[in-house]
Image (cartoon, coloured by chain):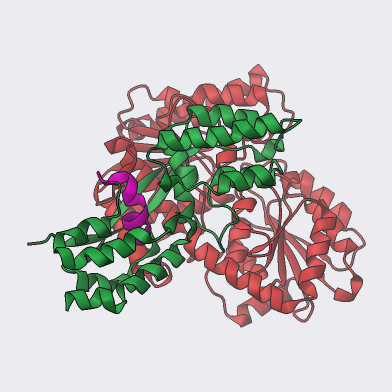
Chain colours: A green, B red
């Protein structure tokens, strides 16, 4: 008997990470080296759930800040192309970011500075989790109810789950694996989604598209 | 007096999902005694927030109350100096000023101590009541300092004095990361919000809006530019007049500078005189000093506006920006403080750094009515999703829950 899946929703509450703000690229390097793991996660992975109007130019706050306030688009592009979910750990992500910044520090003649009012502030978040009252008992329930779930639910179960689950996978895949071989094609399609560079609306559309494919739905008829 | 509104009154606006989230967070806080303390019952953004927050906390099962510091003119002069100093003005803090502040709070502490020491949570708003923590040594609950002011570049002497009083709190809340200072407790970031059902924000009939225009000799057929704020130099009312003077006269605009005085702001009358002098002899400028309870008049003026300005030079958050956005108005705001959280250039309005910038953006908007509609529509939706009171209330209660259970990466609301 498979477990029921409780759809949850979430929001963030931000707090200061306890690291001094950075005013220039050298300070950014120094503070990234010592900031808490949760702060790196916030600035790389929680950007997607913050309010925005359109797809931001850059998916992480470091790239955004170096472009907008240090006026260093080359560095911004190098940082922006990082997909944190390709790193095996936050430590690996930290090393990668530091390498890129250190390389840039070697290249530039002058350390770029931001205006005083536009320093980089290191934050971290508490993820507040809510019950939505929506319970899925089978993959068919997932196919039918996915269009109505909130973007906060998409973030919590498909994105944020990766730091919460033991195997680093999303909640849907882990739950579907309880339904035997028939669920494998769907799980594989979910694993193929390159979600980091999508907005949550785009990700939800992608998920809905996948669960509506005939090869997926036919397996559960 | 706090409002009598209940959560059910908000549900048609915020939706059942948002209501459910509030109830889930409040569940574990039911019956807790929460005391808010500030320095004025009327006037200013803090009083407006507490006006709706207290009844909603009560409706959600918390035992919430609101206490106000009873101060004399000397105390308010000192706290105004604090306010100015924290916003970066040169202020000299003498021993006699400190004594006036400390004596007032010692007197107030005699009255408030039993309530504050028994409370599960005490939320102290701004520096005016900050010293109460030191005067309540037998407190049993969590104390939170809520700083509504932009303290990003404070006067050092003033900040050191305030810091000595707030460092001992269990947590603090700032409106933006830029405002947070290094303190020895967790610092949370919670943006303020507006109450969509307050007199200042509820929908009004067109007849009521028209009657307000008539009352102040404003022409309903001419474009109306409005800035609503206290008469305070940080709001740059004189810069607004300069910006409108630079505008092409063909637009035939009329400018309203309207504001009330807060009971804790003794400088207001001096700034009002400066504004009246700058407006002297200009036919299309209307300077209105409104009483603190003129909420419906402000509402009507915002609704009648073609464009709303908030050309602040320094700003804590700028609730008047939120109010205008909620009414679907294009807003031109100073590129400072919390205004930058709300106005996203070309999406919900425009940010400017000078009177000339404000003039340029007014030109852009007045020449393109469809642009004004688009910005206004996006602005209203942005406020609905991010800056209504349910979000702020939820974050306050989440923080309280976090302090109760211990701060972890995840917090189950229910």
**Is B316 placed above or below B365 here?**
above
Q: Is residue B163 visible?
A: yes
Q: Residue at x 88, y 52 (%)?
A: B277
**Is A93 placed above or below B288 here?**
above
Q: Quadrant of the N terminus of chain B?
A: bottom left
Q: Residue at x 81, y 52 (%)?
A: B354
Q: Position of residue A131 (x, y in %)?
A: 26, 58
Q: Is residue B1 visible?
A: no
Towards the viewer: B103 or B274: B274
Q: Is residue B221 left or right of residue B398?
A: right
The secondary structure making up most of the magenta span is helix
Q: Position of residue A218 (x, y in %)?
A: 22, 78
Q: Residue at x 66, y 76 (%)?
A: B373
Q: Position of residue B177 (x, y in %)?
A: 55, 40
Q: Position of residue B306 (x, y in %)?
A: 72, 72
Q: Is residue B163 left or right of residue A185?
A: right
**Is B391 placed above or below B88 here?**
below
Quarter-of-image position of residue B100 = top right
Quarter-of-image position of residue A53 = bottom right
Q: Residue at x 42, y 42 (%)?
A: A87
Q: Say whether residue B402 is magenta.
A: no
Q: Residue furthest left?
A: A1
Towards the viewer: B19 or A218: A218
Q: Say whether residue A160 is magenta.
A: yes
Query: What are the residue bounds of the magenta stretch?
Result: A153-167
Towards the viewer: A38 or A140: A140
């Amino acid at each position: 008997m498979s477990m029921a899946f409780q759809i949850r929703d979430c929001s963030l509450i931000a707090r200061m990470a306890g690291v001094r703000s950075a005013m220039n690229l050298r300070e950014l390097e120094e503070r990234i080296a010592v900031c808490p793991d949760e702060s790196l996660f916030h600035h790389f992975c929680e950007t997607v759930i913050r309010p925005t109007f359109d797809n931001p130019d850059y998916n992480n706050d470091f790239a955004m800040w170096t472009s907008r306030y240090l006026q260093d688009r080359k560095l911004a592009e190098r940082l922006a192309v990082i997909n944190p979910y390709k790193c095996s750990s936050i430590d690996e992500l930290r090393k990668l970011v530091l390498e890129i910044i250190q390389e840039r520090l070697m290249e530039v003649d002058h350390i770029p500075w931001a205006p005083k009012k536009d320093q980089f502030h290191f934050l971290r978040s508490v993820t507040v989790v809510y019950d939505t009252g929506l319970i899925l008992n089978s993959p068919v329930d997932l196919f039918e109810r996915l269009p109505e779930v909130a973007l906060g639910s998409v973030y919590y179960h498909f994105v944020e789950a990766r730091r919460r689950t033991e195997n680093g996978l999303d909640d849907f895949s882990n739950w579907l694996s309880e339904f035997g071989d028939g669920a494998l094609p769907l799980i594989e399609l979910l694993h193929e989604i390159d979600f980091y560079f999508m907005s949550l609306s785009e990700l939800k559309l992608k998920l809905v598209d996948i669960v509506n494919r005939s090869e997926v739905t036919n397996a559960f008829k | 007096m706090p409002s009598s509104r209940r959560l059910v009154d908000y549900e048609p606006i915020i939706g059942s999902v948002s209501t459910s989230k509030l109830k889930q967070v409040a569940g574990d806080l039911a019956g807790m005694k929460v005391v808010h303390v500030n320095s004025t019952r009327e006037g200013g953004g803090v009083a407006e927030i507490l006006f709706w927050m207290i009844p909603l906390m009560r409706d959600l099962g918390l035992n919430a109350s609101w206490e106000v510091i009873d101060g004399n003119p000397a105390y308010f002069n000192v706290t105004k100096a604090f306010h100015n100093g924290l916003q970066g003005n040169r202020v000299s803090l003498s021993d006699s000023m400190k004594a006036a502040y400390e004596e007032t709070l010692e007197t107030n502490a005699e009255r408030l101590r039993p309530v504050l020491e028994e409370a599960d949570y005490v939320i102290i708003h701004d520096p005016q009541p900050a010293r109460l923590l030191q005067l309540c040594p037998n407190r049993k609950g969590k104390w939170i300092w809520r700083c509504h002011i932009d303290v990003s570049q404070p006067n050092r002497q003033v900040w050191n004095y305030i810091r000595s009083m707030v460092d001992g709190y269990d947590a603090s809340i700032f409106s933006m990361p830029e405002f947070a200072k290094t303190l020895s407790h967790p610092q949370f970031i919670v943006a303020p919000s507006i109450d969509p059902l307050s007199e200042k924000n509820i929908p009004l009939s067109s007849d009521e809006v028209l009657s307000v225009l008539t009352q102040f000799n404003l022409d309903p057929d001419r474009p109306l530019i409005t800035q609503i704020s206290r008469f305070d130099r940080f709001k740059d009312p004189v810069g607004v007049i300069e910006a409108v003077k630079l505008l092409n006269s063909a637009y035939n605009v009329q400018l309203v500078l309207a504001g009330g005085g807060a009971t804790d702001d003794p400088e207001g009358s001096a700034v009002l005189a400066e504004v009246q002098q700058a407006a002297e002899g200009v036919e299309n400028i209307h300077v209105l000093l409104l009483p603190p309870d003129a909420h419906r008049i402000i509402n009507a003026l915002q609704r009648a506006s073609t464009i709303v300005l908030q050309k602040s030079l320094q700003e804590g958050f700028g609730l008047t920006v939120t109010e205008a956005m909620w009414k679907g108005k294009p807003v031109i705001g100073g590129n400072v403080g919390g205004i930058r959280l709300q106005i996203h250039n070309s999406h919900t309005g425009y940010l400017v750094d000078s009177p000339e910038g404000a003039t340029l953006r007014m030109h852009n908007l007045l020449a393109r009515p469809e642009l004004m509609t688009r910005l206004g529509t996006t602005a209203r939706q942005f406020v609905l999703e991010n800056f209504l009171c349910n979000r702020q209330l939820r974050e306050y209660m989440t923080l309280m829950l976090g302090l109760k259970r211990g701060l972890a990466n995840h917090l189950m609301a229910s």
